């Protein structure tokens, strides 16, 4: 029997799937209505896919390490000025003085979800200067080497400015 695609509902109600793998010349896979698997929240701080080992710090609400399981290489720069996938707000107070300031959002929530297709980390924060509610979603597929990152914001009062 051919292997059919798995589906997973993410916390934002979007759906991801695994690729359908079968030999089209020998067999086919049909599904009138796909069986959807909802992501389930978990309290783990470490998880593994076929490709990565990921360490989270719930107290700091961040991903602290992503290690490639094949090479053993650490993929995050431990000395970077900003966190992996972090939203920053850069602004300049005066047009004639190009000294910039950076605002880092205040962390609100950090959740880890697991489903048949992937582990999903959802990191929510709030940036005061723009008023933006920020969501960073990191998707670590269990059977694919891809890592998807979706950064979104809503209710921002001003992300593009001008000098008067």
Image (cartoon, rainbow, N blue to C red):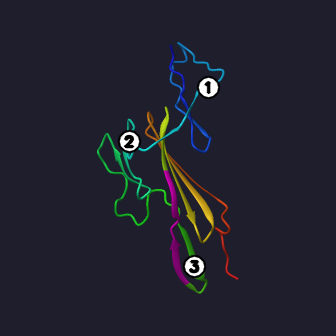
Cα separation, mark 2 vs mark 1, equals: 27 Å
Give the dominant element type of the magenta stretch: helix, strand or loop: strand
Is disc 1 surrounded by few (<14), some (14 to 19) or many (20+) residues within 10 Å?
Answer: few
Range covered by the magenta-colored residues = 98-110
Q: Nearer the viewer, mark 3 or mark 1?
A: 1
Q: Quadrant of residue 89?
A: bottom right
Residue at far left of view: 72
Q: Earlier in the sequence, mark 2 or mark 3?
A: 2
Tell me which residue sits at (36%, 58%) in the image: 77
Q: Could you tell me how far apart the alpha carbons at marks 3 and 1 are, in whole angstroms?
A: 50 Å
Callout 3: SS? strand
Residue 36, image x, y percentages: 59, 29
In the rendered structure, does residue 103 fall within the stretch colored magenta?
yes
Q: Secondary structure at mark 1?
A: loop
- Please tell me whether mark 2 sits on a helix, a strand or a loop: strand
Asked if 116 appears above or below 119 in the picture, the reply is: above
Q: Is residue 136 above or below residue 140?
A: below
Residue 47 is marked as: 2
The local crowd at label 2, few if under 14, some if 14 to 19, many if 20 or more residues have their Cα within 10 Å, is some
Which residue in the structure is indicated by mark 1?
34
Q: Which mark is residue 12?
A: none
Q: Identify residue for label 3.
A: 92
Residue 10 found in image quarter: top right
């Amino acid at each position: 029997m051919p292997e059919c695609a798995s589906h997973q509902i993410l916390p934002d109600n979007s759906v991801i799937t695994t690729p359908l793998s079968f030999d089209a010349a020998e067999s086919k896979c049909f599904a009138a209505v796909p069986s959807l698997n909802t992501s389930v929240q978990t309290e783990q701080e470490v998880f593994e896919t076929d490709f990565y080992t990921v360490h989270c710090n719930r107290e700091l609400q961040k991903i602290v390490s992503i290690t490639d399981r094949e090479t053993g290489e650490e993929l995050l720069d431990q000395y970077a000025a900003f966190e992996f996938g972090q939203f920053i707000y850069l602004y300049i107070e005066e047009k004639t003085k190009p000294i910039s300031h950076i605002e880092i959002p205040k962390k609100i929530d950090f959740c880890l979800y697991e489903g048949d297709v992937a582990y999903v980390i959802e990191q929510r924060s709030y940036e005061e200067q723009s008023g933006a509610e920020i969501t960073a979603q990191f998707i670590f597929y269990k059977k694919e080497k891809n890592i998807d990152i979706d950064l979104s914001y809503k209710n921002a009062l001003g992300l593009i400015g001008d000098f008067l």
